[in-house]
Image: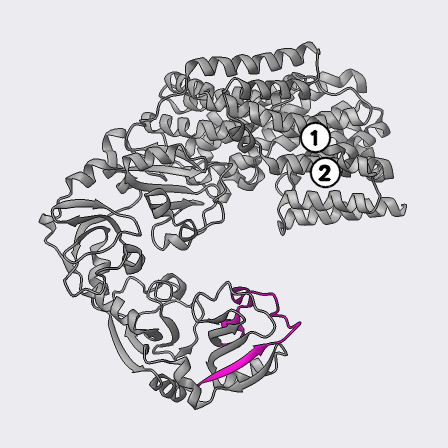
Amino acid sequence: MTWEIAAVLSILAVALVLFITEKLRMDVVALLVLAVLGMSKLVSPREALEGFSNPAVVTVWAMFILSAGLSATGVADMIGRQVLKIAGETEPRIIITIMLSTGILSAFMNNIGVAALMLPVVMDIARKTKTPPSRLLMPMAYSSLLGGLTTLIGTPPNLVASNALQEAGYKPFSFFEFAPIGVPALLAGTLFIAFFGRKLLPGKLPLGFVDESDDLMGFQYAHQLDETLVQLNITEDSPFVGKTLADTHLGPILGVHVDVIKRSGNEIPVTGETLIEKGDGLVVRGKVEAFMEFRKWQAFEMASGTEIAEILAYKKLVLVSAVVKEKGQFDGMTVKESDFRRRFDAHILSIRDEDGIKRGNMANHLFKPGDRLQIEMRKESLPLIEDSGDFEDIELIAEESIADIYPDSESLIEMAIPESSHIIGLHLKDTGLAEDLHLRILGIARKTGSILFPAGDERILEGDKLLVHGNRKSIEMIKGLQALEVADPEKVITPGLLANRAMCEATLSPQSSLAGMTLKDLNFRNRYGLQIESIWRQGKLYRSHLRNMSLEFGDALLISGPIEKIDKLAGNEDFLLLTRTHPPTEERPSTAKAVISGVIMFLVVAIVLTGYIPIAIASIAGSALMIASRCLSIEDAYRAIEWKSVFLIACMIPLGAAMNETGAAQWLAQGVATAAKPFGPWGMIIGLYVMTALATTIVPTAALVVIMASIGIDASGSFGIPPEMIVMAIAMAASASFTSPISHPANVLVMGPGGYRFIDYIKMGILLAVVVMFTVIPMIWLRWHDAIG
C-alpha cells in the first residue's frame, strides 16, 4: 500500500465517520473532502473542481427545476385528481393506484418533490375513503423511491452511477436502460405492499382524520382537544391593563389560547402585540380546570431587597464574584453550553462585560476573558469554582454590595403548589415559571429532602414547595392571572370567531428553512396569525409547552386560525397543507401553463432518447424554457434546487477520481474479489448489493454510489464480467432506501402525518428491500447473463 492509497482511504474513513455520526452536515463534510483532496494534491486543482461542471451534477440541478415547473403549473395535481377518481374503495386497489401513479411521476420528476406533491392527495383519498392514512402514506413514499429506479433521471444515484461508468471509459447508461430492472422492482414492491406489507402498518387514525362533514369538531376529537371556550374578564385594577397579550404570558402559563377579545360589543382579532384594555373579555380556548387550579396557587413573599441575602445565608447560600480566565475552558463558550448550574451547583446572577451588566436572558451570552460573574451558590460548593482553574479574582461579595445585587424591587418567594396542579410531573424547564413569570428557582422543599439549585430536568412532585427569586413584577403577574374573572359560560357567544375559524393539518416542506427552530424563535402566532394546537412526532402527540419544541421534518402540525390566514399558509413554501376544514379559495394553476410544462418535459425526454444532445444539455435547455415560458419564476427555480445534494455529489466526485488514480479503488477491489472468489461473480454482485443497501441507512446515497461504483468497476475485472452489471446493482441498491425514516427525505416527510414510529419503517422496509433484491438480481441476470456464461 502506497502513502497515496493510505491517504485516500483515511480521508474516506473520516468522511464515513462524519456521515454516520452527523457531527457535521453532509454537504459540509463533502466540501471538507474536496478541500483536503485539493490541498494534499491527491487530485489536481482542475480535477478537484470538475465535479461542479460534471454532466451528472448539472443534470441533477436541472431536473430539480424541471420537476418544480411541472409542480407549479399543476401537472402533478391534475394527475393526483385523476388518481382520486380511480382509486376505488378497497384498500389493496387504493394502494396499487397510489403507488403506480407515484412511481410513474417519480420516473420523470425528483422523487422528494413527487412525495411532497402526492402527500395532500393521499391524505384526501384517505379521508374520502375512510382509510387510515398510515396504510397509504408509507407505500406512497416507498413508491416514489421505486419509481426512481426506472429511468436515468429518476434519482441522482442513477445519474452518478452512469457518470462513474463514463469516467472509467465505458458507455454510460441510456435513458430507459434502467427500466427492464426498475419496472419489475416497482411492480413487485407494489404488489407486496398492497397484499401483504400493508398489514404490517398501523391501522389507527393518528391525525385529525375525519369525514369532511365533521368539520372542526372532528379535528378536535381526533387530536384529543377536549377544550371549551371560556371568557376571562379584565378588571379595572388588573395589572394587565396597558400590556400586550404576549406580556401577560396567559397562554404559556395556563395552557390556553386566546382566540379573540370582546371589547365594547365587538370581536377584536388578536396577535401577541394586541394591547389589553380594562373591561376586555378574553375568549380563551382550553381546559378551564388548568386556570381554576392556578388560582389556588399560594405565593408568599418571604423577603425583599437586602433581606434576601439574610434568608439565603440561613439556607447556607453565599454570593461570589469571579472573573473568567483567559484560555480557560469557558473562553468562547456560551452560558448554556457551559452547563454552569449543574457543574458548579450554582446560579449566575449577572455578568459584567465591556457592554455593561446583564441580568436576564444570559443563556446565549458568550464567555470572554475578563467577564465578571456574580454567582449565587451553596457554601460547600465554593471549592468547585476555586479549583476549576477557569476563574480568577474569586471573592465573597461584601455586605455593602448586596444592595446592588438585591434591590428593593427583588423578592424571595415561597410557592406552594396544589396537589392537583397541572405542573406536577413536568420538568422545571417546562413549567413556564422561569421563562414566563421570570422566576429563578433556587430550591425545592419536599418530604424526602430539599434540593438547592435544581436542574431544568428536575420534575415537580406532589407536595413540593418552591423557593424562587423574582421581582415585584412577577408577584403582580401571578396576582393578575389569579384575579381574572370567569364569565358565565352561556354569555360566551362569538359568532364571528366561529364563522371565520378553521383548522388544517400541515407538515414542513422538504425545502423548508424552519427545521430546528422553535415556535418561540419563529414568533409563530404573530408571524402567521395562526395557532399550533398540537404536534404529532414519531407516533406521539404533544399538546402543551409547544413553543419550546424545535420543529422537525416529518412533524404533523394541527393549526387553527382565520380562514384567510390558513389560505395564505397554503402558499407558503415552508409548509405543506395536508387536510383542512374548509375548501381552498386559491385559484388553480392555468391549464395552458400545465400543457406548456408538460410539452417541455416531453421534448427533453424525446431529445435525450434520440441521442442528438447529451442529457445535461437537454435538461438545461428544458429548465431555461420553463423559466422563459413563465411556468416557473427564476426565484422559484433557485429555491427548487436542493443545493445540499448538488454540493454533495459535486464534492464527492473528486474522491472517486482520487480512488481511481491512486489505486485505492483497485486495492479495495482486490479485497472484495478475494473475499467473493469462493462464491463466484454472482456472490460478488449480491455482496456489493447487500453492502450498498445496508449502507444507505447511514451514508448519503449519492456519495455511496461514488465510492461503491469505483470499487465495483475495478472488481469486475477480476471476474471478467461487464462493469455495467455491478454498477446497475449498486445503483438499484442505493436507491432502495426503505429501512429507516432517515434513509431518505421522502420517508421522513410522511412520518408525522402517518403517525409512524421508527419500528414501522424497519418492519416494512427490511421485507420490501428483500423483495426488491430478489426481483432486481434475476432481472440483471436476464439482461447480462450471456456475458457471464
Horizontal relation, residue 113 to residue 442: left or right: right
The quadrant the N terminus occupies is: top right
- Asked whether 404 falls inside the magenta stretch, the response is no
Task: Determine whether 638 is above or below 410 in the image.
Answer: above
- Residue nearer the viewer, 576 or 394: 394
Q: Is residue 765 left or right of residue 79?
A: right
The reply, left or right, for residue 544 in relation to residue 99 is left
Q: Measured along the vertical axis of the image, is residue 151 above or below residue 229?
A: above
| Eye-nearest disc, 1 or 2 | 2
Out of 270 and 158, give the one closest to the viewer: 270
| Residue 555 on image: x %, y % | 44, 43
Crowd tier of the residue under label 1, counting other residues whose Cα lies within 10 Å: few below 14, some 14–19, many 20 or above: many
Question: Which range of residues does the magenta coloring cover?
Answer: 317-345
Q: Which residue is mark 1?
A: 730
* Dot 1 or dot 2, earlier in sequence: 2
Residue at left 33%, top 36%? 566
Amino acid of disc 1: Ile
| Residue at x 83%, y 35% (from the top left corner) | 660
